Amino acid sequence: MQIETTTLPGVLLLTPKRHGDARGFFSESWNRGVLEAAGVHLPEFVQDNHSFSTAVNTLRGLHFQSPPHAQGKLVRCGRGALFDVAVDIRKGSPTYGQGFGAELSFENGRQLWIPAGFLHGFVTRAPDTEICYKCTDYYAPECDGGVAWDSVGIDWQLTAEPVLSGKDAAAPALADFDSPFVYEAKA
Ligand SMILES: Cc1cn([C@H]2C[C@H](O)[C@@H](COP(=O)(O)OP(=O)(O)O[C@H]3O[C@@H](C)C(=O)[C@@H](O)[C@H]3O)O2)c(=O)[nH]c1=O
């Protein structure tokens, strides 16, 4: 398991080992013990999500669930390729409003850990792309929220107009958004 820090403290890039042979490869896509042995403790996961996007430039985000159902997410790409983004929305955080993006693909096998207190979104880079992610809380539609994808200073490297849901097209800009998250500095 390769573990890399990012420009956003708390957001991690994980690359599980792949055992290749003549058939293809085998990989443990999630193993708590391996991470803990490396000093990384993630919260318990209670829900796994899987979504499929047919078109390149399909953009889902930027989403969060507010407390008491805030979610941390461990994201990977099951098929195709995507650009996955986390944005810090913890009020008072030294990195408030800053984003980090990484290419996650079937080919590279990378995963992005996004703690609660961050927006999450992604854009597909290949047709028929699947995303799979583990969540630390259950879906709670009453806590569902979003921020406009084009209001956070991320270069999404789109090659055409993004394909958006109606909800995402109507999301407020970060500048007009009152975040429910507050930064808690580690002691
Ligand atoms: C997120 C979610 C949605 N749904 C339902 C609600 C709706 O009918 C349908 C599609 O929901 P959405 O349009 O919100 O799906 P989508 O735009 O793919 O939303 C997801 O985007 C990414 C970026 C995330 O980080 C996720 O947490 C989630 O917000 O699925 C669930 O049943 N459970 C869930 O956990």
Image (tube, rainbow, N blue to C red):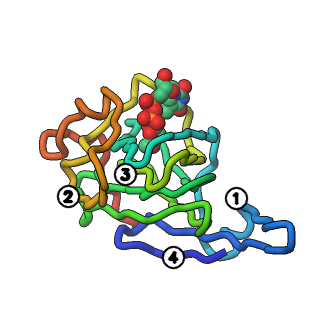
- The residue located at (30%, 34%) in the rendering is 168
Q: Which residue is mark 4?
A: 4
- The residue located at (26%, 64%) in the rendering is 95
| Quadrant in which residue 30 is drawn | bottom right
Point out the tag, 1 or 3, that comes first from the N-terminus: 1
Residue 94 locus on image (x, y percent): 24, 66
Distance from the alpha carbon under mark 1 to that under mark 4: 16 Å
Decide: is 133 above or below 8: above
Residue 65 locus on image (x, y percent): 41, 36
Distance from the alpha carbon under mark 1 to that under mark 3: 21 Å
Distance from the alpha carbon under mark 4 to that under mark 3: 18 Å
The numbered dot on residue 153 is: 2
Residue at the left extreme, as displayed = 175
Assess whether mark 3 and mark 1 are in contact (beta carbons under 8 angstroms): no
Q: Secondary structure at mark 3?
A: strand
Does residue 139 appear anywhere in the picture? Answer: no
Decide: is 100 above or below 121: below
Pair 4/2: label in front: 2
Decide: is 104 above or below 129: below
Other residues around mark 2 within 10 Å, as few (<14) / some (14–19) / many (≥20): few
Q: Secondary structure at mark 2?
A: loop
Q: Amino acid at mark 2?
A: Gly
Q: Secondary structure at mark 1?
A: loop
Q: Amino acid at mark 3?
A: Phe
| Quadrant in which residue 93 is drawn | bottom left
Does residue 180 appear anywhere in the picture? Answer: yes
Q: Which residue is mark 1?
A: 30
Quadrant position of the C terminus in the picture: bottom left
